[in-house]
Amino acid sequence: NAGVTQTPKFQVLKTGQSMTLQCAQDMNHEYMSWYRQDPGMGLRLIHYSVGAGITDQGEVPNGYNVSRSTTEDFPLRLLSAAPSQTSVYFCASSVGGSNQPQHFGDGTRLSIL
Amino acid sequence: DQQVKQNSPSLSVQEGRISILNCDYTNSMFDYFLWYKKYPAEGPTFLISISSIKDKNEDGRFTVFLNKSAKHLSLHIVPSQPGDSAVYFCAASARSSNTGKLIFGQGTTLQVKP
């Protein structure tokens, strides 16, 4: 089973470049989220979506955009990459509600030079 | 402001002994708590959860205890095995918000020595 699939696994960008991190899930989950993991900071919520067409900000949304046009896909866009966005990014999905465990992808390791 | 805190960055235990990982939270609206396990180069995987209406939940070798008055939860692993070596994150959510938002702690790296 594919579960939550993130692409690419690794990426190096220059400051000011833009890119989109892809996330797709095949479990028909309503809820999807993006987190970033930094040393000593745990996982911090960037943006989340409770269904197609609905998105909202998490703890650290600045510098990132999201959209949710389909149930399956939840891309994360960096419009103008900054070195502070160097991190490991995880996408997660859950069947719905705050009492359901989230399923995570294997992450995208992003370096901004 | 860190709403969920794991104050021990690392823990080392001997195989067969008990591992106790701790987590504190500050937001009284949190009513659902989860533990995730993470191996290097992989995403976190769900381990066990507990609702605020309970004070204990058990699943095999893993038990989570919740002390609401102290805003504290702990994960007990008995007996610990070398394969349990990983980073453990606690997370919390407020079900009343119905948003699926999880707030994570910083993580504790557990090393189980053979």
Image: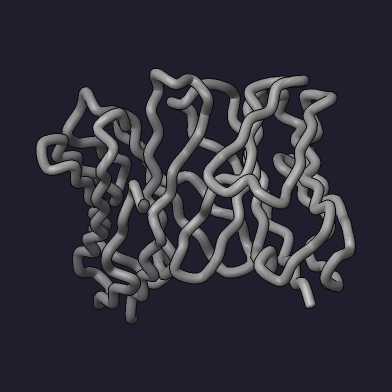
Report whether B104 appears left or right of B22.
right
Q: x%, y% of residue B69?
A: 10, 36
Horizontal side of A92 relative to A53 (left or right) equals: left
A14 and A93: which one is in front?
A14
How are the colours assigned in the image? one colour
- x, y (%) of residue A28? 72, 24
Q: Is residue A103 left or right of residue A23?
A: left
Q: How many marks?
A: 0
Residue A56 drawn at (x, y percent): 63, 30
Q: What residue sits 31% from the left and 55% below the top?
A: B5
Rendered-image quadrant of the C terminus of chain B: bottom left
Taking the spot 65% from the left edge, 44% from the top edge, the residue there is: A34
Residue B84 place in picture, x, y as percent: 40, 64
Which residue: 68% across, 28% down?
A: A55
Residue B71 location, quadrant: top left
* Residue furthest out toward the left: B69
In the image, what residue occupies the spot 25% across and 36% down?
B57
Residue at the far bottom in the pictured view: B114
Report the side of A18 relative to A42 (left or right): right
B85 vs B68: above or below: below
Which sits in the foreground, A79 or B106?
A79
Work out whether residue B33 or residue A20 is closer to the camera in this orientation and state it. A20
| Rendered view: A58 above or below B16 | above
